[in-house]
Image: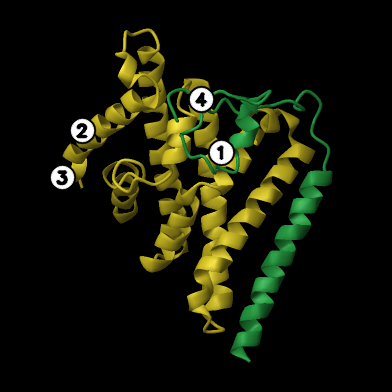
Chain colours: A yellow, B green
Amino acid sequence: MQLFTMFISAMLINNIILSKFLGMCPFMGVSTRLENAVGMGVAVIFVIFGASVLSWFLYYYVLVPLHLEYMELICFILLIAAFVQFVEMFIKKNSPGLYKQLGIYLPLITTNCAVLYVAQDNITQGYNLLETMVNSVAVPAGFMLMLCIFACIRERLQGNDVPKAFEGNPIAFIIAAIMAVAFTSLSGLV
Amino acid sequence: MKALLAVLIIAVLFGLNVWLYRANKKTPVPAGCENLRPECNACGIRDCAMRGQFTSGGKEDNHGNH
């Protein structure tokens, strides 16, 4: 039950985009079409989960025994970059179909600050491995949910008559702000 | 001793990064995926590392960001 509460909280209430304002670059850039949003969302879930679990092991099995906890930031950055390179190479070699769908989004994810946030959050909150795994699925799931909702809204907006001054990103930011206000009402859910 | 260990860990991770980067570059792209381009309209961040990939023929596919 506690894990379920944690999942809902990380996915909806403390949504990484609408309450933490992280990962805004892909949120604005890759949300023009639902198809792209789904591809990016799946890739983000995969990378955040893998990178967070690896970071957890690195922290508790290497840095803590050696009393080098202060190096977590630099180590996590290098680990995430290496993991993304490995995943891209693995998919290229073993699954061309998957590469066609996700491959183009993988380099984008390296620059997504949400990946580093989740890896560090798991450590600062003192989560165990199971809690880390749940949090590392819930946060990117929330990211994907927002990305898909936002992409649907933007697809519908394309046919609408938006004032010249609001065309493009300005109207997108206004929509994101309204979405953030709407999602604050979920704060009493858990 | 601790400082040496810290440097060693950074060196290992950095070496791993370089090795994986080079291995990834050498891995051939699957057939039909040579010209994949993310349909990112960019977000207005001028120094984005990925921005160059979203431009075609020097003309940016960007709306309302100047």
Determine if marks 4 and 1 fall on one subunit.
no
Residue A57 visible in the current orientation: no
Q: Mark 2: which amino acid?
A: Ala
- Which element carries disc 3, helix, strand or loop? helix
User: Between marks 4 and 2, how big is the CA–CA gap?
Assistant: 29 Å
In the picture, the disc for residue B62 is: 4
- The crowding category of the residue bearing disc 4, from other C-alpha atoms within 10 Å (few below 14, some 14 to 19, many at least 20), is some
Q: Which residue is mark 1?
A: A43
The CA span between labels 1 and 2 is 26 Å
Residue A123's place in the image compared with B60, above or below, is below
Q: Chain of mark 1?
A: A
Q: Quadrant of residue A131?
A: bottom left
- Residue A178: x, y in percent? 23, 30
Vertical position of residue B14 compared to residue A188: above or below: below
| CA distance separating discs 1 and 3 | 30 Å
Name, please, the residue furthest toward the front.
B66
Disc 2: which residue: A182
- Rounded to the nearest angstrom, the CA distance separating label 4 from label 1 is 23 Å
Q: Amino acid at mark 3?
A: Gly
